[in-house]
Amino acid sequence: MNRTQLEQNAALSAQDGNSVAVGIADIKLGRSPQVIKTTLGSCVAVCLYNSKQRCGGMLHFMMAVPLPGDMMRENMRKAKYAQTGIPELLRQLKAAFGLSPEQFQAKFFGGANLLSSVSRNIGKINEEAVRAILREHGVKISASLTGGNKGYKIDMDMATGRVRCQIFGEEAREF
């Protein structure tokens, strides 16, 4: 599935009133009864949830760290990278809901190795970055599913904190 198809799927998911679609290199926040959704390939979705306030957010990032020179750009999209996107998601959650990082549970998904011609396993690098950055911020990880060679469809229910994860061509699972 290419980038255009992923964006189209995300746009279609946003059509019902309580759905919030997260695009590529994007962050969205929500609270019950909303459902935050995205579609992934080698990208990773980081889902943060607070059960007391039934709120949270999702980051859909592409790469673990910015490319050389990107940090110098004034208009760099923080959500494009785990290194800048996770702290930005935490900052937005603090501003919107007054909650600190340790008040959230994390689940993350994606990181498929879709391009067999690429020698680096971008998905694995992304997974390792997420684990390190969340640990650094004191966020506990309660679930994850990463890797493989197929895309993912993710739905995060703000009422329950459950994440429905479907790897393309397989049955959906709840985390």
Image (spheres, grey):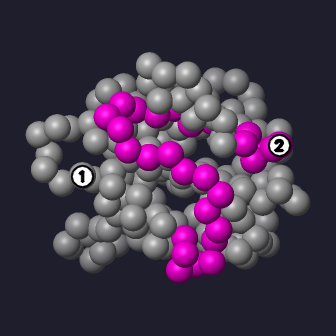
Number of marks in the image?
Answer: 2
Instruction: Classify the position of the C terminus by image quarter.
Output: top right
Q: Is residue 143 left or right of residue 84?
A: right
Q: Looking at the image, can residue 87 be seen?
A: no
Q: Quadrant of residue 171?
A: top right
Label 2 is placed on what type of residue? Ala
Q: Which mark is residue 121?
A: 1
User: In front here: 101 or 109?
Assistant: 109
Q: Quadrant of residue 116?
A: top left
User: In front here: 142 or 15?
Assistant: 142
Whether residues under marks 1 and 2 lie with C-beta atoms below 8 angstroms apart, the answer is no
Q: Would you call the spot at circle 2 few (<14 residues within 10 Å), some (14-19), or many (20 or more)?
A: some
Spatial CA distance of label 1 from label 2 is 34 Å
Q: Quadrant of residue 79?
A: bottom left
Mark 1 element type: loop
The residue at 58%/78% (across/down) is 137
Q: State yes or no: residue 97 in magenta.
A: no
Q: Which residues are magenta?
A: 134-162
The residue at 70%/24% (across/down) is 16
Residue 164 position, x and y percent, is: 64, 35
User: In front here: 68 or 103?
Assistant: 103
Q: Is residue 145 left or right of residue 72?
A: right
Q: Report which residue position mark 2 lands on.
A: 159
Q: Is residue 122 left or right of residue 15?
A: left
